[in-house]
Image (tube, coloured by chain):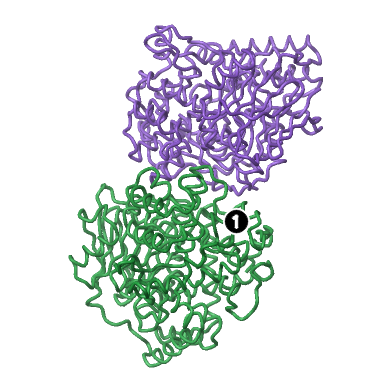
Chain colours: A green, B purple
């Protein structure tokens, strides 16, 4: 029987509730956003006692279907001040789903300055005081909890950055290698830190399999879905071969590779950080060129990176981090970037926000562009230790810009712009501007259509035509992916393979005994986006916040592209 | 002949323009706000090349009338993101007025990383490169310029904080003692720093007297005005005797003295920082218990503070700084506060913003409450030197709060709340919430009516009744004070002495040959407030920004008062 777990840190109580009817047909992002919109005062301080932190597995999580294990976290973001949903791989979505937990809602703040942990199992949630792991990095948390609770324990954890309530603090989830995947964006780790919860351990050993209304139909649909994923060139070939870093050369060729704090669109050392170089390096050193962020992943776009001596350095080493530290901070050196990636994961900061923050810090004169060793030193000695400089960097790109008086600060709604220049890939610029989450490429990944022809139609990345419509369509579809617990890249076969969406609907209906049609997707997307936007408006946001920073009026080489959308053109996004 | 001086830092050009007809009947704040609203793109980056910095003397500045020497500076504020007018005493208003300069408008940013100065005289403005004084404190700037240009030179200057574009950086103006008065609030020093202007020197030696349309009428009116000021108990007795620090005991008795970062409304050591103690100390040490911020001041609420050995420490030592460092940061020691005041003036930070920032830093664990020596050390070694901690503090209270994850951060529109608790002095709370400038007691000083019966009517400080109407009335009247170049305290006789406003109108009409009536004041106030608010709305502000921080729902001792205005009640402020 599905349930809601509710934890109140003000009186250290927990309870199990039935699922209200209006939440029953939801999961993942649609559910976290619905709960946050209903239960959180939009104008509250995100680190105060009126904010709530919500976790929810996707609707298809816990089943045997491929790539359905994304786990949503939601709250009012301390970074952006907007509503926030950020999803991660790892084990937790599948574990929550098997335990029948539709959502975990954490409210209130403890009265005492103690630290706590939550433990979730078939009986519900319980709270314990925690001392040993306070101040420890995420990897130590996982290792210690496996020693304490057994190898199979699930873990959701924050690092020192979350404890210190840094605005770039993420929430990490243990994966099947006992490494980490993260709810990266929007500083949700600071919300967990404000509630003084260091980690959540999960025991699903006594959980039954996820119930299926029609097991046979589900199996058939899941097979058709997997086939669509495998037969698409991006999810079946490009991503499994080169990982997400395959984008380095593609985006560089398009002139949209943010370089030197978004000053140029191409990086002279792009070959040194490309997906091709990454793959060769990993293979030569005995790492893993393929790896999944979740059990059941058939794309395997992740990988495990080793050093020259063959020792583990990092995993889940993504295009964003590689590009932003590599080209945007001009550190053309995979070893330095990988070492930074590991530290960021351990101290628990979003590697996008933090990497962009370093680019701004370099423009502000804190360290030179290209100083990879400086980045490593500041991450270890400052961010991890919470020195004043560390707190500045750990509070994200906007904070760094304000601190050092930098005017070229690539943020929207105070969240760092990821690794695609919006001037030369204009569709993603519309997503950055209009997303309810602040600048976020994953909320409407127009890069696929702009650069790789996903979706069939041609939308010229350098022209304004069709970009608003493209971003709107993708943002609506993406809600479905984030709600079902699907990997973002399922968006590619969903757009291109005619069998994919019908298979998804069949899986849903076979799982729940519903009769949903593909039209349901549009309604879900529209409703969720409108719910999120209404929260933001009630929090004080206006169309004026749906803007890119002024400096994107500067032309960017090689196309001398500028950000030339009028306010009216951007605002038309919301005409639905 | 009145003129506008326009300086373009992008091409290092200057020019003299005629005064457009629609600006001719304005001065001070009404003029700076009109110019900023017309010429500045509301969504621009305040430190970027689209912001403009405007200086304007009051309409009555330069005449022999008492207390008419306030000088307005305006721009889009980098601290608040709103339009900003901040006015200061000193010599500049009188000098500009005598030179016939209605306004100085500085636009653009230099292309090169050089520093410049402006020189203003009867021929207009000229630009020179500056090297010697870069990095120097404000007092060194004044001393050096007097050596370079003669004792009579006027000076408008920024300290290291302004050079570093810290968001609390002020702009200082030389006074008749060769000390400083400041455009404190809103970080206008950072705007001057962004334009790479270290100082403006003023030579008015060849300026004629300010022309008067009817000299005799002016003289008579000025005499009546001075009489009204001198006969009012506040401006004739209280302020001249104890300075602004007379408020310490009054506000403490009312339970509205912010203490320990706005946790309590009374301070056990209030006697140690009271106006009475200040006066005794100054007299015992041979300082000056009376002093004016401008030539022609007949209130003399300022003073010169000496140390135990009789040596000069600081002047312009105001209630706000004394209260906020004294009670709110729990430093019950006038010597420490005075030493801090001097350093803040020298490095060029707003002593309100910075003092509140220390309270938040103390709550965030950066230093203990009451650590006066720690404040002095951080001011000297960090803020003045621009270390990471110094930049955090120097960017103001909101920035400190975000940096250290503090939730009790007393700011409105990111500007620090001054030294009156809005829960127990509710009228000033409405001013904080609704002012177009961010939290600012000087934009509608309801404390006078709430605590001292100014204006005759009784408006109970602890009740909501009448506060919105009171604040609205005062904000409208204050525009007139800020536009004529009048000291804020003229508001007391203007409210209570029936001869005061007619005398002001007579002075204006005698100066300009106009036929303005007292009704003109209301129209000026309404129009200016609406112009300022329209700018803010175009910049993205909404009613949601007219709110006090969430933590003011906490009751404050001794009255257990809470901030209990509804959104609708606050928003009714704008119903005019």
Q: How many marks?
A: 1
Give the SS element for disc 1.
Answer: loop
Question: Residue A304: x percent and y percent?
Answer: 35, 71
Say which quarter of the image contains residue A472. bottom right
Q: Residue at x 70, y 35 (%)?
A: B12
Vertical side of A331 occupied by A444: above or below: below
The crowding category of the residue bearing disc 1, from other C-alpha atoms within 10 Å (few below 14, some 14 to 19, many at least 20), is: many
- Residue of label 1: A548
Question: Residue B413: x percent and y percent?
Answer: 53, 42
Vertical side of B567 occupied by B199: above or below: above
Front position in the image: A81 or A22: A81
Front position in the image: A270 or B458: A270
Say which quarter of the image contains residue B294. top right
Q: Quadrant of the N terminus of chain B?
A: top right
Question: Residue B69: x percent and y percent?
Answer: 65, 19
Q: Residue at x 66, y 44 (%)?
A: B50
Q: Residue at x 56, y 83 (%)?
A: A496
Vertical side of A287 occupied by B184: above or below: above
**Residue, far left:** A148
């Amino acid at each position: 029987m599905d349930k809601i777990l509710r934890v109140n840190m003000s009186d250290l109580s927990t309870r199990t509730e039935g699922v209200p009817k209006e939440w029953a047909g939801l999961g993942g992002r649609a559910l976290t956003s619905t709960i946050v919109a209903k239960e959180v005062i939009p104008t509250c301080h995100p680190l105060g006692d009126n904010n709530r932190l919500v976790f929810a597995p996707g609707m298809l999580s816990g089943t045997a279907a491929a790539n359905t294990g994304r786990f949503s976290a939601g709250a009012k973001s301390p970074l952006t001040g907007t509503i926030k949903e950020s999803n991660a791989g790892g084990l937790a979505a599948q574990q929550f789903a098997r335990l029948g937990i539709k959502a975990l809602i954490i409210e209130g703040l403890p009265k005492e300055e103690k630290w706590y942990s939550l433990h979730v199992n078939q009986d519900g949630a319980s709270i314990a005081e925690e001392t040993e792991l306070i101040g420890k990095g995420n990897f130590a948390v996982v290792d210690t909890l496996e020693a304490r609770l057994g190898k199979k324990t699930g873990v959701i954890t924050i690092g020192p950055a979350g404890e210190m309530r840094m605005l770039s603090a993420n929430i990490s989830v243990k994966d099947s290698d006992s490494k980490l995947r993260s709810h990266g964006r929007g500083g949700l780790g600071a919300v967990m830190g404000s509630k003084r919860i260091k980690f959540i351990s999960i025991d699903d050993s006594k959980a039954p399999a996820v119930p299926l209304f029609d097991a046979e139909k589900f199996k058939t649909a899941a097979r058709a879905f997997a086939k669509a994923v495998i037969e698409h060139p991006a999810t079946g070939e490009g991503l499994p071969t080169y990982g997400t870093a395959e984008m380095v050369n593609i985006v560089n060729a398009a002139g949209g590779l943010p370089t030197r704090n978004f000053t140029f669109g191409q990086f002279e050392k792009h070959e040194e950080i490309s997906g091709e170089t990454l793959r060769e390096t990993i293979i030569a050193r005995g790492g893993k060129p393929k790896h999944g962020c979740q059990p059941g992943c058939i794309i395997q776009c992740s990988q495990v990176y080793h050093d020259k001596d063959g020792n583990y350095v990092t995993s889940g080493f993504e295009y964003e981090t590689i590009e932003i530290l590599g080209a945007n901070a001009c550190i053309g050196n995979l070893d330095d970037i990988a070492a930074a990636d590991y530290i960021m994961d351990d101290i628990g900061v979003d590697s996008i926000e933090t990497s962009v923050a370093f680019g701004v810090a370099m423009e502000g004169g804190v360290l030179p562009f290209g100083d990879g060793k400086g980045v490593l030193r500041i991450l270890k000695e400052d961010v991890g230790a919470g020195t004043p400089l560390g707190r500045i960097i750990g509070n994200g790109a906007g904070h760094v810009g304000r601190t050092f008086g930098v005017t070229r600060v690539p943020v929207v709604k105070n969240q760092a712009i990821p690794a695609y220049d919006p001037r030369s890939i204009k569709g993603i610029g519309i997503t950055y501007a209009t997303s309810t989450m602040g600048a976020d490429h994953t909320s409407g990944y127009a890069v696929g259509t702009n650069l790789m022809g996903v979706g069939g139609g041609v939308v010229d990345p350098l022209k304004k035509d069709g970009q608003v419509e493209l971003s709107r369509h993708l943002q609506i579809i993406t809600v479905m992916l984030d709600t079902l617990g699907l990997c973002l890249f399922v968006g590619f076969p969903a757009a291109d393979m005619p069998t994919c969406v019908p298979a998804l609907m069949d899986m849903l209906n076979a799982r729940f005994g519903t009769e949903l049609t593909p039209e349901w997707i549009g309604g879900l997307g529209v409703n969720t986006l409108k719910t999120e936007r209404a929260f933001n408006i009630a929090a004080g946001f206006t169309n004026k916040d749906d803007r890119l920073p002024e400096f994107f009026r500067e032309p960017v080489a090689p196309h001398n592209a500028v950000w030339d959308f009028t306010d009216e053109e951007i605002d038309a996004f919301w005409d639905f």
